[in-house]
Amino acid sequence: MAQTLTILGLESSCDDTAAAVVRQGRGAAEILSSIVYGQTELHSAFGGVVPELAARAHAEKIDICVAEAMARAGVGFTDLDAVAVTAGPGLIGGVLSGVMCAKGLAAATGLPLIGVNHLAGHALTPRLTDGAAFPYLMLLVSGGHCQYLVARGSEDFTRLGGTIDDAPGEAFDKAARLLGLAQPGGPSVEVEAKAGDPKRFRFPRPLLDRDDCNLSFSGLKTALMRTRDQIVTEKGGLTRTDRADLCAGFQQAIVDVLAGKTRRALRLYLEDKPQAPLLAVAGGVAANSAIRSGLETVCAETGVTFTAPPLRLCTDNAAMIAYAGIERFRAGARDDLSLAARPRWPLDRTSPSLIGGGKKGAKA
């Protein structure tokens, strides 16, 4: 790892427009800049991300984001070794915005172009933040994705299981809409849950009776809706306590499901007897403190090290894309101007596709 690489990363797969500059030499990678323009206010009135609006906002902001990231890092294009960009999976209009911008930069500067799988960006984040050694078990849990991956190399991932319908982030968003809370739903539900009693309402723990690593969250949302409707019928409405207790029970069900499935994923991962067993979690839902606590407990029980990125690197960002680009660059990967934007792009190319499309991004 003698060569020092400085790479510009671009990310636009959903509702965050991001650019970052990351540098790595012999030691740990350094994030020189990381700029993220969110779209929460743009989509708030619609109760979720509107793909057409998101794509337009990406097209308007991506060049501004790049300029700000370069200025913040104090580098020019002659200081860069390559441009890395999310080429999928995600909302195709947003992905296309980033890919076209990256192609333009590469064509104008002569820099190499590197297409990065958005999921690989999340999955390699523990190497960016903690220098994690392969192999490790990754729980990728976000608005559009949820899967267990054994990471054996920068492009070598084995999926042990994943969601067959809604991802946890989607479930949180739908729960928030059902209860009249602000979007994005994850933070809103978490705040309400802190004041609630998780034992008052007992929601189902889907698929925990199956001895595999697959998950399902759509039925949990339906159970919440029915419980809410029952309370409204009996009382004529929801009190603040009712809403807090519903959020607490709903969140606890997700925590329990993830904890139970993580135990099974760890069992499979540990069969290979890794020298330094590690469970890493990444993705937007990894910012949820209750979920982190539940996973930490599972790791403590099994003697496996637990790691999670800083909250700013849990949600979509371009630093993870730039770092994944560094790993691909060192492996000799290069793309050209024929690089295509892809709505679907599984990390594990041998396992059968998971069922379900997903509101915020294609299941892989």
Image: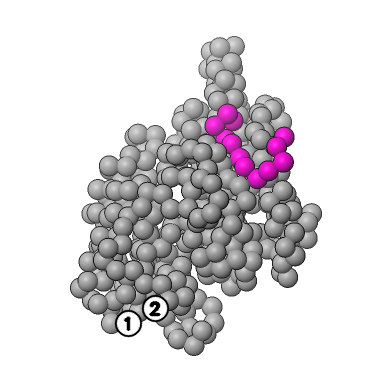
Q: Which corner quadrant of the image does residue 7 belong to?
A: bottom left
Looking at the image, the residue that sits furthest to the left is: 108
Residue at the (52%, 32%) spot, across then down: 175
Q: Can the viewer see residue 35?
A: no
Q: Are marks 2 and 1 in contact (CB under 8 Å)?
A: yes
Q: Is residue 218 magenta?
A: yes
Q: Amino acid at mark 1?
A: Asp
Q: Residue 267, relative to residue 79: is it above or below?
A: above
**Nearest the eye: 120 or 198:** 120
Q: Which corner quadrant of the image does residue 227 belong to?
A: top right
* Residue marked by disc 2: 6
Q: Is residue 163 left or right of residue 69?
A: right
Residue at the (39%, 37%) spot, across then down: 48
Q: Is residue 111 left or right of residue 172?
A: left
Residue at the (47%, 72%) spot, across then down: 327
Q: Which residues fall within the magenta stretch?
A: 209-220
**Nearest the eye: 353 or 191:** 353
Q: Amino acid at mark 2?
A: Thr
Q: Point out residue 179 in the picture as x, y percentages from the top left corner.
A: 50, 28
Give the main secondary structure of the magenta stretch: loop
Mark 1 neighbour density, 10 Å: few (under 14) some (14–19) many (20 or more): few
Residue at the (73%, 70%) spot, across then down: 275
Q: Residue 211, relative to residue 100: is it above or below?
A: above
Q: Is residue 333 magenta?
A: no
* Residue marked by disc 1: 79
